Amino acid sequence: MSYGGFQRLHRLGADVAGYLIRQMDDQGRIFDVVDDAPTPKDHYAQTFLAWACLNLELIDQAERALSAFFDRPQGWWNHPDFNSFALANISVHPRLQALSERIKKQVDSYLESPPFRSGPKTGVSNNWLAMQAATLALLGRARGRMDWQAKARKIVEDYALAWQLPDGLFADFPVKPRRGGFATPLTYHAKICSMLIRYALLLNHEQALSAGLRGMEVLCRITFSDGSAFQFGRTNMGLFGYACFLDGLNNLLERGIGELSLWAEVQLALLAKLEPLQEADGYIALNPSRNVSQRPSWDEYMHLTVYNAYFSALATIKREAFRGEISFRKVERSAISILTSSGLSHIKAEETELLLSLSGQAVLGQGHLFCDNRYAGMNICHLTHKDATVVAPPPLNTKELNGPFEPSFLGFHPWFVEEGSRYQFKSFDLVDIRRGEDDAFLLIVGLSKPVSFRAIDWDGKPIYERVMRKLGRMIIGRRRPVLDRLEKSRPDLQRVILVHLHPFLILFIDRLSRMGETTGLYSPTVCFSATSWKEMDGGVSFVDEGGKRWEFLFIPTVEGSAKKVDVWSSSGKTTILSYPAKYANSEVWQSTLLTKEEERPKEFRFDCSGERFRLDLMWEHKRLGLSGQVGGRGLISIGRDGFG
């Protein structure tokens, strides 16, 4: 490929593989500098590193990594789907014959009946099942096993194709939609797309290829121009997602399938984001924070060596350059792109980009991976200006069990305290979306019911814990987090979000309706990446990474001083600022405006009464006037005098 995307990626993957080889001891164990210990045996670093070594024709190193893998017990709890996928690709590799007879026999024996942990009733997330289909398709075609090909086709047709929502994103959980919702983390959407495309190309399955192409197109169109991606859901902004996304793009580019100009543009943007994350030693930081020593924003299952090995294997695949022509025109993307069924909106206004969650996803009762605050609705997922982070992707505190559920760890996530207990609003129903004429603004209204966090104590129930482990569900320590919906006596939240594109601003309007008599404290939370910040009359100002000054303006005046806490997000150090507002037995209105300092409206008026509100914003030569009602299904009217 003349633009050099494949070569750049191959060089990056080769450097990573070289680092991992240097971390191997004589037994083939890979030392993880973050864990300060060898990679856990139940992972897949060795098999993917061996695959990368074969790609690079490093036979001795591949042999050593595979020996370490086969010399350990192969339990069901290990990551068999990943290891089966890697070994299947090794089994058809052109350099397989260079390995010793002992290793070749072990590979062949492992794949006689390739082990998988994923399945419709196992509780393992859907990207694993998509990987199983890709593995069976590869092995079935290579070994002439029609039964394996049929099983792969059944997985795809009965399950995988049904995971794709009407807007094009794939649900990573559950296998079959049921009460309790679904989760569409963007990282694992990329993984499902990657595996579906591999499967479809192997078995010539047009419907699966079409679904994979649509999924890739959607992900491309909500990826930021600077290559920032996967800001919604777990493993946000992580190396694993980049590996999967690039694998899907490369398979399409290599074969000249689909929107080649879009694939090439996004591939180069992703590489430009990844390359600065490579350390001098050769490994790639798992997310842009680069502060690997503290495992910032990592889920507890992540390991530096494992994800680097996965990336290196996919990055170093030797690809034949596509012989056609690629137009390098800049692909035009819509100023406002709305994924209604997944609940995401990507907004681009000149040099400012925003990913906004709409309805949110709360898969209650299904474990911490699918219901933590990174799935919260009516929230800023990521905001950049001139490629500098303004609002970081939602942070995650992995050091505390309650971290993923603690409301104050997430920017703009509304929560309230009543009688010493803390409650939060995670998902929004009855979401109403209005677009202004010529996409001048986006107006969203939603209604949310509160949920509470509690931890179930498993002490005294060792039998149940063993059964749960056998079923493949994780128990973290002796306590497991659960989110529950509250009784009807708790207040509901109606939230309005206005995004105005020119000038750019974001306005939050919250109405907490009361159904009880208790006085409490309502507190949205502001989350931003700032080099400096200061309190000002009616709000806070701060400077983003690029030196641009922004302002948060609060109306009405907050009750007392704001609480400032520094945490680590996937983009780096992030400041959490909670500003409380007292409420009594009627309702509370709260309004927050985020704007660039030089584009602040000269007049900002917000009036409310009952369920109705009136908003007036006046700039030097522009006016925006809105009136609305946020009861029932949300917005009822928009003022006719709106624009000047």
Image (tube, rainbow, N blue to C red):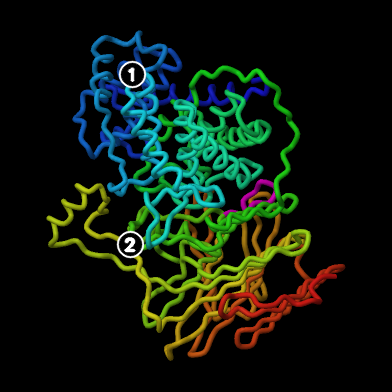
Kindly state the secondary structure of the residue where label 2 is placed. Answer: loop
Q: Is 384 situated left or right of 195 in this image? A: right
Image quarter of residue 32: top left
The reply to whether dot 1 and dot 2 touch (C-beta < 8 Å) is no
- Identify the residue at horizontal 47%, vertical 50% (top origin): 185
Q: Residue furthest right?
A: 621
The answer to whether residue 530 is seen in the rendering is no
- Identify the residue at horizontal 54%, vertical 19% (top origin): 319
Residue range in magenta is: 382-389
Q: Is 279 situated left or right of 67 in this image? A: right
Query: Which one is nearer the viewer's eye here, 442 or 570?
Result: 442
User: Residue under circle 2?
Assistant: 365
Q: Percent from the top left, x then y, of residue 255?
A: 58, 23
* Tag shown at residue 198: none
Q: In this view, does 224 lie above or below 641?
A: above
User: Residue under circle 1?
Assistant: 143
Q: Percent from the top left, x then y, of residue 511?
A: 56, 79
- The 10 Å Cα crowd at callout 2, few under 14, some 14 to 19, many 20 or more, is few
